[in-house]
């Protein structure tokens, strides 16, 4: 078990280096574009050259990369090209916003999806068909379209929830929760349907398995069979796919944050990309990779606890 977790951590460290490296070289190749984005289209060649020299953009790309990497190892992601602020000062207040959205979506699509999957597997065929239909719709519907529909219905027509904006929980916990309801639903809906379908299929396999028939023959109650035995066996495969669903939700958070005007990492990523602000983009990529690594490690631990075969390996 420890060996498997160690190998996953090692792979995560490699990912933590590879992704920011690719991002750096893709974004950092056009220093002239960076200068013109900051100085404007009317900037002269001498102004661009002076800007590049001040920020070190006239140095070879590999030299700039190793300079950035040396600082990043110590938590220093450099200065923003557009504001000259430390990148960590720009991103730190936005991290809490993104974590509120991402963690909320993870909890919602895990809990609600598994609950719907269990109900579908243990209910009548009509319930199962409804879950199948909703799952198909949920996977096909893009989160930006769903976000617009949610705003139109619950914010504009019914006036039940705020359409945009974010309230800090220290200011008003109630408004904080209200400001996250629609974004979390928009981000989690596809995950709910995917988890529900996966849970339903795994539950049906577990309930129809030979060990389930043996338990029934020995007098086990249906409640114990479903929630103590079948659900535990079905949970391990479901937990495994949660990592894939989470990565999709993480990328979708960029769109959702911009639609609901949430001051998180996703909205900053779009703004910094348009401005060619490479240090900020690099910092955001590192933050996102760290979040993915932490969630995947937690999923591996949960899978190890639920799956005896993994625990014995």
Image: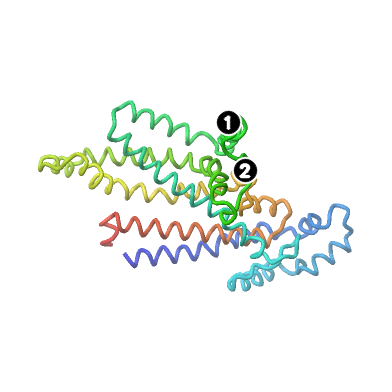
Work out which residue is located at the far top of the displayed protein and give it. 126
Mark 1 or mark 2, earlier in chain: 1
Q: Residues within 10 Å of mark 2 (few under 14, many from 20)?
A: many
State the image quarter where residue 44 is shown.
bottom right
Question: What kind of element bears circle 2?
Answer: loop
Q: Which percent across, then down, holds residue 68?
A: 65, 69
Does residue 143 appear left or right of residue 244 in this picture?
right
Q: Which percent across, then down, holds residue 127?
A: 34, 29
Residue appearing at x 49%, y 57% in the figure:
292
Residue appearing at x 36%, y 47% in the figure:
238
Residue appearing at x 57%, y 38% in the figure:
161
Relative vertical location of residue 263 with respect to residue 55 in this rendering, above or below: above
Q: Which percent across, then down, holds residue 75?
A: 60, 70
Residue 158 has which mark?
1
Camera-nearest residue between 210 and 145: 145
Relative vertical location of residue 108 with respect to residue 278 in this rendering, above or below: above
State the image quarter where residue 2 is shown.
bottom left
Camera-nearest residue between 166 and 253: 166
Does residue 78 appear left or right of residue 141 in this picture?
right
Mark 1 or mark 2, which is nearer to you? 1
Q: Which percent across, then down, holds residue 76?
A: 63, 70
Q: Quadrant of the C terminus?
A: bottom left
State the image quarter where residue 221 is shown.
top left
Work out which residue is located at the far left of the displayed protein and give it. 218
Camera-nearest residue between 75 and 162: 162
Q: What's the CA distance linking mark 1 and mark 2?
A: 17 Å
Q: Which residue is mark 2?
A: 260
Q: Quadrant of the N terminus?
A: bottom left
Camera-nearest residue between 89 and 81: 89
Question: What kind of element bears circle 1?
Answer: loop
Q: Are marks 1 and 2 in contact (CB under 8 Å)?
A: no
């Amino acid at each position: 078990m420890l060996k498997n977790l160690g190998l996953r951590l090692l792979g995560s460290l490699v990912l933590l280096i590879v992704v920011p490296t690719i991002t750096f070289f893709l974004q950092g190749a056009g220093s002239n574009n960076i200068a013109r984005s900051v100085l404007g289209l009317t900037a002269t060649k001498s102004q661009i050259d002076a800007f590049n020299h001040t920020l070190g953009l006239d140095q070879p790309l590999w030299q700039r990369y190793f300079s950035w990497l040396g600082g990043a190892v110590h938590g220093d992601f450099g200065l923003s090209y557009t504001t000259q602020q430390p990148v960590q000062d720009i991103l730190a207040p936005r991290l809490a916003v993104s974590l509120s959205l991402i963690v909320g979506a993870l909890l919602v699509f895990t809990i609600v999806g598994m609950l719907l999957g269990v109900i579908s597997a243990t209910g009548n065929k009509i319930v199962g068909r409804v879950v199948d239909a909703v799952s198909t719709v949920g996977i096909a519907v893009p989160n930006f379209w769903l976000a617009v529909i949610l705003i139109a219905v619950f914010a504009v027509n019914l006036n039940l929830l705020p359409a945009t904006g974010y309230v800090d929980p220290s200011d008003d916990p109630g408004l904080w929760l209200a400001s996250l309801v629609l974004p979390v639903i928009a981000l989690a809906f596809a995950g709910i349907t995917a988890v529900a379908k996966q849970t339903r299929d795994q539950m049906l396999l577990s309930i129809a398995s030979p060990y389930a028939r043996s338990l029934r023959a020995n007098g086990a109650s249906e409640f114990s069979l479903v929630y103590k035995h079948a659900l535990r066996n079905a949970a391990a495969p479901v937990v495994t796919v949660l990592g894939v669903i989470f990565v999709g939700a993480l990328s979708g958070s960029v769109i959702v944050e911009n639609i609901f005007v949430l001051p998180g990492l996703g909205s900053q990523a779009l703004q910094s990309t348009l401005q060619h602000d490479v240090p900020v983009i690099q910092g955001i990529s590192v933050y996102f990779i760290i979040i993915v690594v932490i969630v995947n490690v937690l999923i591996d631990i949960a899978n190890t606890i639920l799956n005896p075969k993994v625990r014995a390996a």
